[in-house]
Image (cartoon, rainbow, N blue to C red):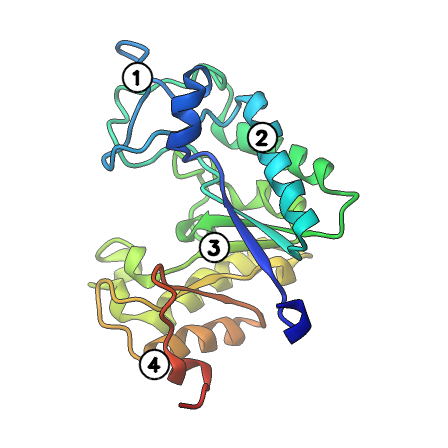
Amino acid sequence: LHNKGVYVIGRITVFQDPYYSKLHPELAVKRASDGAIWKDHKGLSFIDVSAKPYWQYISDLGHEAVALGFDELNFDYIRFPSDGDMTNISYPWTGKLEKKEALRLFFGYLKKQFRDTPAKLSADLFGMTTTNTDDLNIGQYLEYTLPYFDYVAPMVYPSHYPPTWNGYKNPAEKPYEVVNYSMEKAYKRASTTPDKLRPWLQDFNLGAVYTASMVKAQMKAVYDVGLNSWMLWNASNKYTKEALGAKE
């Protein structure tokens, strides 16, 4: 990839980790009722954000990726759980510590661990972190993320916004409007570091059939805010050639 001039990003999913939870249940998010491992609606389990032994594991993964030649480490699922029985959940390691503060401490740890490496660090956030001033009950708070990463990537997929959000009956059908509004808010909040913002854009069908023009509309929305960088997401890695200017 480097021989072809490609900048290589390695994505590391963090706290949603059913495999590690099974091996190390003492670090996992628990059910409040009986202390068993908590699972979300999909049956997936999480590591408690404040479980510091797990931080070392993530650091080790990242350093191995850097040694393999990755130019950037992209951290995803850096959050507390959101989809499950939130009335029967406990965080043995985090306790009463504010969720956004727990994540801020983890971010500080990552920055320190990789400060002597050539790798860039990036963080994936829920799209609504750009417009919400709370932590969405998952600990993600834009102002607590920006200082610790080279790039911050809000996942502003229009399909992931709830019906009537910002007055749009179906936000998925408003790709330009959703992305432009969201990233304009983020730009203002980023203050002196707006160039750290590099959103994830939607190139998949959900809520609407995403045509090339709809994918391009999101790119234009980013440019119109004053930003020049974005990433596209499609879980199957099938991207719309026409939106990228690729020739058949």
Residue, disc 4: 212
Q: Nearer the viewer, mark 3 or mark 4?
A: 4
In three-dimensional space, the C-alpha distance between marks 3 and 2, rounded to whole angstroms, equals: 25 Å
User: With respect to residue 181, does 4 lie above or below?
Assistant: below
Callouts 2 and 1 close, C-beta under 8 Å: no
Judge by depth and name the residue closer to the eye, 2 or 130: 2
- Residue 109 falls left or right of residue 129: right
Callouts 3 and 1 close, C-beta under 8 Å: no
SS class, disc 2: helix
* Residue at 27% from the left image edge and 19% from the top image edge: 88
Mark 4 crowd level (few <14, some 14–19, many ≥20, 10 Å Cα): some
SS class, disc 3: strand
Which quadrant of the figure contains the N terminus? Answer: bottom right
User: With respect to residue 117, does 230 lie above or below?
Assistant: below
Which amino acid lies under the numbered mark 3 shown in the image of this protein? Answer: Pro
Residue, disc 2: 57
Which amino acid lies under the numbered mark 1 shown in the image of this protein? Answer: Arg
Sequence-first disc among 3 and 1: 1
Which amino acid lies under the numbered mark 4 shown in the image of this protein? Answer: Ala
Q: Nearer the viewer, mark 2 or mark 4?
A: 2
Residue, disc 1: 31
x%, y% of residue 20?
Answer: 44, 28
User: With respect to residue 173, does 77 lie above or below?
Assistant: above
Q: How many marks?
A: 4
SS class, disc 1: loop
In three-dimensional space, the C-alpha distance between marks 2 and 4, rounded to whole angstroms, equals: 40 Å
Q: Nearer the viewer, mark 2 or mark 1?
A: 2
Sequence-first disc among 2 and 1: 1
* Residue at 63% from the left image edge and 55% from the top image edge: 72
Q: Nearer the viewer, mark 3 or mark 2?
A: 2
Mark 2 crowd level (few <14, some 14–19, many ≥20, 10 Å Cα): few
Sequence-first disc among 3 and 2: 2
